[in-house]
Each structure stands twice: as structure tokens, then as C-alpha cells.
């Protein structure tokens, strides 16, 4: 079994910054892509940013130039640095990881709340 544990959410004023972390633990061979997704009330979950094991990144247009995703493969951890936060960034943020063990399976974290006040 694989666990993803997120941390770093909270309440911040518009224009502020937060850094999210997500650490994977358990039994697996390797982790392929990792990513961050978010879900606001009454909206569908959406991709925020993803990163491959080789470091190739992809961002939603709404967060480009403001958010940066990175990972530490030795620690099986993915980060999301969020700058210039806006009220519309308010959501529950989830990390996801494509984990290779007996095949490849996507695991999800429990989510962390990010609230941006205006």
C-alpha cells in the first residue's frame, strides 16, 4: 500500500505565498509522474501542475508564472510553490502519484485546504 501525505495548506491573503508538500511512502519500485490537482466548491477537480520523473513540467494556464512544481526523487516528495495567490485559487489541493509496483497505479493524497482571502 502507498500513502501520500500532504502538508502546507492554510489561510493567506491575496498576493501571498504558500508551499505545499506531498510525501509518498509504502512499498513500490518507483514513481512516475506526480502532480497537484484542486477542487473548489461545486466545481470539478482540475489539474494544477504535473511533473515527470525526469523533471518535465506542465501547468494549467491559470497558474503559469505564479506556481512552480518540483520534486525530490530521493525523498519521494513533490512540492508546489504558490506565489501571488488569488481568491480564485481557493480550493482543496490534492497530490497524485503514478506509482509502479505490480503495474502502475495512481494514488491520491487526502487533500489540504488552501484559502485565499481578498
Image (cartoon, rainbow, N blue to C red):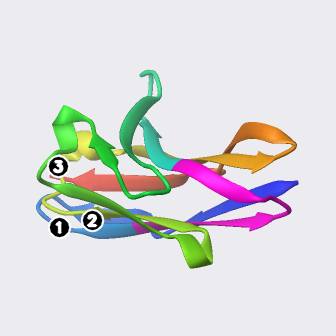
Q: Which residues are magenta?
A: 20-33
Q: Is residue 67 left or right of residue 45?
A: left
Q: Earlier in the sequence, mark 1 or mark 3?
A: 1
Looking at the rendered image, the disc whose residue lies closer to the viewer, 2 or 1, is: 1
Residue 34 lies within the magenta run: no
Residue 20 place in picture, x, y as percent: 43, 66
Disc 3, SS: loop
Name the secondary structure under disc 1.
loop
Marks 1 and 3: CB-CB under 8 Å? Answer: no
Question: Considering the image in quadrants, where does the N terminus appear?
Answer: bottom right
Contact, mark 2 vs mark 3 (Cβ under 8 Å): no
Q: CA distance from mark 1 to mark 3?
A: 8 Å
Q: Main secondary structure of the magenta part?
A: strand
As measured in the structure, the alpha-carbon distance from the residue carrying label 2 to the one carrying label 1 is 6 Å
The residue closer to the viewer here, 63 or 89, is 63
Q: Which residue is mark 1?
A: 16
Q: In the drawing, what numbered circle is on residue 12?
A: 2
Judging by the rendered image, the residue that carries numbered circle 3 is: 86
Report the residue at 27% width, 41% height from top. 59
Residue 77 placement: quadrant: bottom right
**Does residue 86 lie above or below 17 as drawn?**
above
Amino acid at each position: 500500500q502507498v500513502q501520500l501525505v500532504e502538508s502546507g495548506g492554510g489561510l493567506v491573503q491575496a498576493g501571498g505565498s504558500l508551499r505545499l508538500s506531498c510525501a509518498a511512502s509504502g512499498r513500490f519500485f518507483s514513481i512516475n509522474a506526480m502532480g497537484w490537482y484542486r477542487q473548489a466548491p461545486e466545481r470539478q477537480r482540475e489539474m494544477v501542475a504535473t511533473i515527470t520523473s525526469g523533471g518535465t513540467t506542465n501547468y494549467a494556464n491559470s497558474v503559469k508564472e505564479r506556481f512552480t512544481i518540483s520534486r525530490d526523487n530521493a525523498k519521494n516528495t513533490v512540492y508546489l510553490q504558490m506565489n501571488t495567490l488569488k481568491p480564485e485559487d481557493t480550493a482543496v489541493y490534492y497530490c497524485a502519484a503514478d506509482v509502479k509496483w505490480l503495474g502502475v497505479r495512481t494514488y491520491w493524497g487526502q487533500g489540504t485546504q488552501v484559502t485565499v482571502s481578498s
